[in-house]
Amino acid sequence: MSNINNLSPWHKTYWFARMLINTDKYGGIGKDSKLISYLSASLKTIKESATDLSDLEILTLQKEVLSQILKERFSRARSRIKRIEHLITDLEKEITTSIEMEVFLFTCDHIMLPINNALANVPSDDKIFAQDIARAYLKKHGEKGLGLVVKLWDDLGVKGSLTAERMEIVRAFGALRIILEQEYPFTPHDKDIVYTAFVQEFERRVAQKRKTRAGGSLEDVTSFILDFYKIPSSQGPEHFRADIEVDKWIKTKDKWFIGISCKRTIRERWKQLSSAEAQILSNYKIKQLYHILVYDEDLSDDKLTRLGSQRHVFYLPDDSRILLRASRHVGLQNYVRPLSKLIDDIKAEM
């Protein structure tokens, strides 16, 4: 890091942000806005009040206080204290001048805190953007509209959430620009360094939230559909311990279970599913596994045959090319069904 940072101390803006947010190596204190605010205020107060000390003495005192605050805050956190000590050690190495301490404080105030606030306003799931429209559509079109509801939920949720992300980054970026132009004497190059550090860190963290949101989107719409049709479901039977990830469970009239797997594509669970032999399903009274897919182009004949023979059934959009081809194939037609049949098939098992 040191060779890069010799170009400008403001290059450390990004690296300080990464250190503060790194959970595995440094304990991830950057997500704690109250702690970051307290650290920043404490270190600034030292500089403002210690007017009789030299710059080096002020810096030394600031680093001692930084270390003391963190050690006291996490003294009882056995699982984190070693990582916090590692953070203190590495910050000691990286903050060697008064300007580097200024960069660290700037990172706390104008990178970490605004990003934390912005992310708090970004939705954690897509439901708020889609459920009212989905409800209205099902009331009008019934089960024939299931495929479109699933697709609408996905599209509306993604667009709504991305729009919320854009609004937050535009707002935070605008505030940062005012600070850089009015409150700090930056060169144009240093401004670019700070801007890119902010955008890079924001996008990295919001991408993690986006991935989590995407993983739950299809499960959310499936739960919504089951609730809409008053079909009782659960997260899984108590006795279930097999290595098969299933999102929703429905108890059948013969006291077995229908498992429902909600993923955009089968690619995400292909290796896991291919090892789930029919005997394993029987051991846990799993009658069938229903897969609800949004994107099915990676659903090859080989996958259909291998999984279908092990009591996996795939529900695809009614206009799916894969569904049309497989439904005309004597060996595959029992393994694929249109989404519009999902509710009827479930009710037939209850």
Image (cartoon, helix red, strand yellow):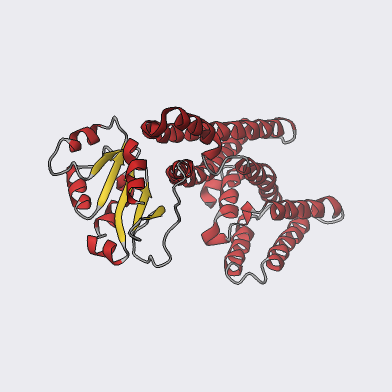
- Compared with 64, 314 (above or below) is above
For the image, the number of numbered tags is 0
| Residue 184, quarter of picture | top right
User: Which residue is depicted at the point 59% across and 67% down?
Assistant: 80
Is 161 left, or right, of 47 in this rendering? left
Q: Depth check: give the residue in front, 17 or 138.
A: 138
User: Which residue is depicted at the point 67% across and 42% down?
Assistant: 110
Q: Depth check: give the residue in front, 51 or 266.
A: 266
Residue 143 in sight here? yes
Residue 192 pos. (x, y %): 58, 33
Is 341 left, or right, of 212 in this rendering? left
Q: Check the image and name the residue furthest to the top.
A: 140
| Residue 81, quarter of picture | bottom right
Residue 6 pos. (x, y %): 57, 46
- Compared with 257, 239 (above or below) is below
Is 83 left, or right, of 102 in this rendering? left
Q: Depth check: give the residue in front, 61 or 315.
A: 315
Residue 186 pos. (x, y %): 67, 34
Residue 295 in sight here? no
User: Which residue is depicted at the point 15% across and 35% down?
Assistant: 328
| Residue 82, quarter of picture | bottom right
Residue 321 pos. (x, y %): 24, 31
Q: Check the image and name the residue furthest to the left.
A: 330
Q: Depth check: give the residue in front, 33 or 162.
A: 162
